[in-house]
Image (cartoon, helix red, strand yellow):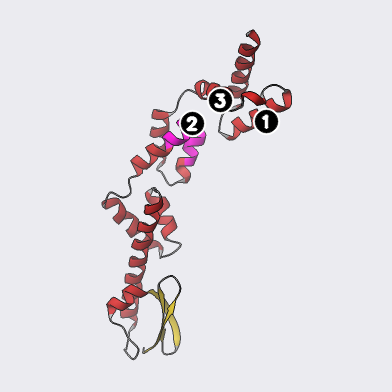
Amino acid sequence: MLVTALEPRRKRLTALFLDGELAAKLDSETLLQSGLRIGVELDDEELHRLIQRSDAHRAQEKALYLLEHRSHSKKELADKISRTAGREAAERAAERMEELGLVNDAQYARNLAEELLQRKRFAARRAEYELLQKGIDRALAQEMVEELAPEPEESLQFLLERKYQRSLSDEKGRRRVFAALQRLGYSGEDIRTALRDYIDYENED
């Protein structure tokens, strides 16, 4: 197959044309390093290797870009990279980031669990669900939640006093608070108990 054209594209890509047909869009830096130019013959094996190298380079670049902005779990990172590069290249890039210490699922899970449980005051089951959604292993997610979750009564009391106090003066407001607490993952029974105890305490005053 003959290289008949190399045309720049957006996002640092170059379109490679073989025998007049578009064969692949490759990372421009990888293509430059390969020394490929118009008029050169390229066989299927060489093309495959070039595509693999391009994918690997794009995956590494995407991984570093994503990690500059915030931390990710290994799976979350691979999933995002795979939108840019092939799945295999994405997983290899995520593994490389882990080897370099730029991805650490245990630390990521701990930080996220602390944020959800202690700052946002999610219920344990909602926090565990969010960790799983980020690609954290179920056993690790459960371990972090069990270690860091306050008792539901404590979190509910905190939320009622600090966030929802003004909404508890009438039945309509209490229904809205009940629904909001359910969205945070608390059970109906725990919410009803917390509301009853809070209202009883306020009435005593």
Q: Which residue is mark 2?
A: 124
Q: Position of residue 8 (x, y in %)?
A: 42, 79
Choose top left, top right, bottom left or bottom right for residue 147: top left
Point out the stretch of residues depicted in magenta: 113-130
For label 1, the SS is helix
Q: Secondary structure at mark 3?
A: helix
Q: Quadrant of residue 63?
A: bottom left
Residue under circle 1? 176
16 drawn magenta: no
- From the viewer's perspective, tell me whether residue 41 is left or right of residue 14: left
Q: How many marks?
A: 3
Q: Amino acid at mark 3?
A: Arg
* Classed neighbour count for the residue bearing mark 3: other residues with Cα under 10 Å, few (<14), some (14–19), many (≥20): few
The secondary structure that dominates the magenta segment is helix
Residue at which label 3 appears = 162
- Decide: marks 1, 3 in contact (CB < 8 A)? no
- The local crowd at label 2, few if under 14, some if 14 to 19, many if 20 or more residues have their Cα within 10 Å, is many
Q: Give the CA distance from mark 2 to mark 1.
A: 21 Å
**Residue 121 located within the stretch drawn in magenta:** yes
Which of the 4 image quarters holds residue 4? bottom left
